[in-house]
Image: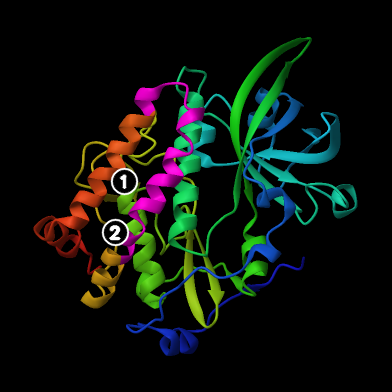
Amino acid sequence: MKKEVIHLSLTLLLLLGHNSYAQEVTKTALDEKTTELFKNSQILPIQLNYSNKHIKRNTNDSTYVSSELSYKLDDGSWKTLKMKIRARGNNRLKNCYFAPLKIKLKKKEVAGTLFEGHKKLKLVLPCLRQEDNNDNILKEYLAYKLYEVISPYHYKTRLVTIDYTDQNGNREKEHTLLGILIEDLDNIAARHNGAIIERSLHPLTMDDLCAAQNDFFQYMIGNTDYSTAYQHNQKLLFIDKKIIPVPYDFDMSGLVDASYATVPTIEDTSLHITSVTQRLFRGFQRELSIFYKLRESFLGKKTEMLDVMDRLEVHFDNSKEFTTARDYMLSFFEVLQDSEKFKSEILQKARIK
């Protein structure tokens, strides 16, 4: 798959500019373009063997180390693939015990396997060695699945159970973890016949509906740790003459409410909230019709989103974690259903700069 990257000119941005009448994005029949790895929603058992300390200390954006990934086949046997890995995620790398991974795979190595069609993947691991680590992974996975309900422009994800052997010199330590495999941005671009935008752009140059949809979603999960302008926990795609944001990394959200999560400072801007569970709408002002259209759209998808959540309940180690997360979601819909709250918490909080 050839990566296509574009750099938009000022003229093109002005032509595409503020599209108040952007057509509503609806789900389309894209299943045939989804790889086998992400067509199946069952949890995939995998095995990993590497040094967590070495990965954290000795890899960077351009430095990978060789390793192997084994995954369980339907007949109970295991298939092993050669791969290269590095640590990723500045915040998690700084604050977490387990480093999240970027995985590189060779086309020849994955041909005819479950991983065919993937040259790069991300693997999200629990941050810390603590009781709620797997539940936090479930809640972050939930955020990805909720965005699938909201927008067709999303990352495909799959839960994995990981038998991980951490090598430390002559010592080995075994860990059983839950993780999230995430497809690469190239796959999303290819699925929609789009291109990747690498430069920084003002949010008001983006498609009105898609950008506001993203902002509503971030408010729903209580996430302020993002910036579409600077592509912080966001990527930009150019699809059908529209600039579309695609969000990722939700561990700092109120929905996840991780023990290490703190209110971020975005581009030296301090937010006037004291806890990640406090919601703050970070979107820009747009045509009111866009906001009201999205209000109805989110309310119309309430049952579907709660169903997505309820199907994950059985996997939670602590039922209280699930109940708290579900109540948090319900509080979002209460804001949408109450006209005064919708006005004060969203419409009046929309940014002008």
Which of these two is toward me, 272 or 27?
27
Residue 319 position within the rendered picture, expressed as x and y whole percent measured from the top left:
39, 23
Say above or below: 347 vs 194. Answer: above
- Which residue sits at x=72%, y=51%? 120
Q: Residues within 10 Å of mark 1 (few under 14, many from 20)?
A: many
Instruction: Give the quarter of the image for residue 287.
Output: bottom left
Q: Label 2 to label 1, Cα distance in Å?
A: 17 Å
- Mark 2 vs mark 1: which is more N-terminal? 1
Callout 2 amino acid: Leu
Q: Residue furthest left?
A: 340
Q: With respect to residue 268, does 246 lie above or below?
A: below
10 Å neighbourhood of mark 2: few (<14), some, or many (≥20)?
some
The front one of 9 and 206 is 206
Write the start and end of the magenta stretch as one range: 297-321
x and y percent of residue 314 in the render?
49, 29
Q: Amino acid at mark 1?
A: Gly
Q: Which residue is mark 2?
A: 299
Question: In the figure, is residue 330 to the left or right of 205?
Answer: left
Q: Provide residue 37's location: percent of width, then percent of height.
A: 71, 48
Residue 239 vs 15, above or below: the answer is above
Residue in view at x 45 percent, y 83 percent: 13
User: Which quarter of the rendering shows the C terminus?
Assistant: bottom left
Magenta span: chief secondary structure: helix
Q: Position of residue 344 (x, y in %)?
A: 12, 58
Tag 1 secondary structure: loop
- Residue 319 magenta: yes
* In this rendering, position of residue 269 left or right of residue 146: left
The magenta stretch spans residue 181: no
State how many labels appear: 2
In the rendered view of the protein, which quadrant contains the N terminus?
bottom right
- 328 and 13: which one is in front? 328
Residue picked out by circle 1: 222
